[in-house]
């Protein structure tokens, strides 16, 4: 079994910061990549950030680049999303996911609500 456990969501003011965590069990950390996704009401689910396990290569959506940072801690089998300068349009349910191989997002966390007030 592969399990992803998320934490860190909540309510923050615009301009504030929040740090999301995703702890992986099983063989998730030996896969290709971990990613953060989000979905707002009436909007499609979108990729926020991705990091590969072995080399730490990262990818960011244009809307969050220079504000969000994805990182990993191999010893703790945990991936983080540091979110700074938050905007109301960042409000969404955020999900972490694991891709054992390229583009196969097979495992998902439960989702955590991030709400940014104006």
Image (spheres, rainbow, N blue to C red):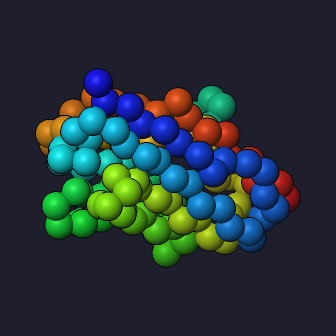
The residue sitting at the right extreme is: 118
Q: Which residue extends farthest top?
A: 1
- Foreground residue, 63 or 2? 2
Which residue sits at x=49%, y=38%? Answer: 5
- Quadrant housing the N terminus: top left
- Is 87 displayed left or right of 111 in the figure? right
The residue under the point 49% across, 75% down is: 66
Residue 78 appears in the rendering:
yes
Q: Is residue 45 left or right of residue 16?
A: left
Residue at the extreme front of the image, as rendered: 75
Residue 51 picture location, percent across and down: 30, 58
What residue is shown at x 23% (from left), y 66% (from top)? 57
For the C terminus, which image quadrant? bottom right
Residue closer to the observer: 90 or 32:
32
- In the displayed structure, would residue 65 be above or below residue 4? below
x and y percent of residue 55 in the render?
A: 17, 66
Using the rendered view, name the quadrant where residue 94 is placed: top right
> What residue occupies the far bottom of the structure in this picture?
66
* Tag count: 0
**Residue 27 rendering spot, x and y as whole percentages:** 22, 39
What percent of the width, then of the height, locates residue 7?
A: 59, 46
């Amino acid at each position: 079994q592969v399990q992803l456990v998320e934490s860190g969501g909540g309510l923050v003011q615009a301009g504030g910061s929040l740090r999301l965590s995703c702890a992986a069990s099983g063989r998730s950390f030996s896969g290709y990549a971990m990613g953060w996704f989000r979905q707002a009401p009436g909007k499609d689910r979108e990729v926020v950030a991705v990091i590969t396990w072995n080399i730490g290569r990262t990818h960011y959506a244009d809307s969050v680049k220079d504000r969000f940072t994805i990182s990993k801690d191999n010893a703790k089998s945990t991936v983080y999303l540091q979110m700074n300068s938050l905007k109301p349009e960042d409000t969404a349910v955020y999900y972490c996911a694991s891709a054992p191989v390229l583009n196969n997002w097979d495992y998902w966390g439960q989702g955590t609500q991030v709400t940014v007030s104006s």
